[in-house]
Amino acid sequence: VLAILSAGMLSFLGILDETATTVTFPTLIKEFSITTDQVQWVNTLVLLVIATIVPISSQIRLRISTKKIFILGVLLFTLGLIIDILSPRFDLLLLGRAMQGVGTGIGLPLMYNIILAEVPKEKLGFMMGIGTMITACAVALGPVFGGMITDALLSIMVPFH
């Protein structure tokens, strides 16, 4: 159960982060002096990386233990988040986003792989539903969370501009 919750949390945070950034686009455009076309890469890059990692994750899982894969996913996601927070330039922000995409791309299928491997057949449908609910909640909450964070940061930063 702990493994499912842990992988679920990584999935939740990855999806929450991906959906939260869309509402930050106006702020990112202003802060980095970039165009609308450029800011779209903040989400596009993450989705491209996730779409690349998810299909190969089952092959990775055959070679590396679930625990090591999970730790790698958490480390990459966290390091990417730190780079994002501290990035003074847009290209560094994109590097951090790509790292977060790898972490999320590892976490999403890992959650379902753990459920399929560890849950008894009679509870499999329910637990797969819980896994899907985790990602659906992240999709729904992401934009609200992103808006709250953006508003909070703007209210702190405005006096310094």
Image: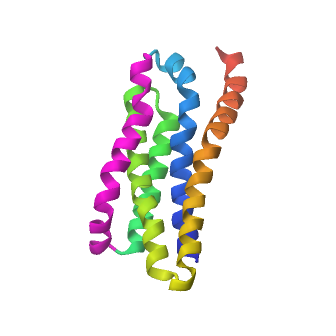
Residue 109 to residue 47: above or below: below
Residue 90 to residue 78: above or below: above
Q: Quadrant of residue 59?
A: bottom left
Query: Where residue 32 appears, x then y in whole percent?
Result: 47, 20
Query: Where residue 21 appears, x then y in whole percent?
Result: 54, 35
Query: What is the image's colouring?
Result: rainbow
Residue 62 among magenta residues: yes
Image-based side of 64 in relation to 140, left or right: left
Q: Main secondary structure of the magenta part?
A: helix
Quadrant housing the N terminus: bottom right
Query: Where residue 107 appears, x then y in whole percent?
Result: 45, 60
Quadrant housing the C terminus: top right
Q: Quadrant of residue 152?
A: top right
Query: Where residue 53 appears, x then y in whole percent?
Result: 32, 54
Image-based side of 112 in relation to 143, left or right: left
Q: What residue range appears in magenta?
A: 35-64
Q: Residue at x 62, y 52 (%)?
A: 137
66 and 78: which is toward the camera = 66
131 and 102: which is toward the camera = 131
72 and 117: which is toward the camera = 117
Residue 51 among magenta residues: yes
Q: Quadrant of residue 62?
A: bottom left
Image-based side of 142 in relation to 59, left or right: right
Q: Residue at x 40, y 59 (%)?
A: 106
The total of numbered circles placed on residues is 0
118 and 6: which is toward the camera = 118
Q: Residue at x 46, y 51 (%)?
A: 77
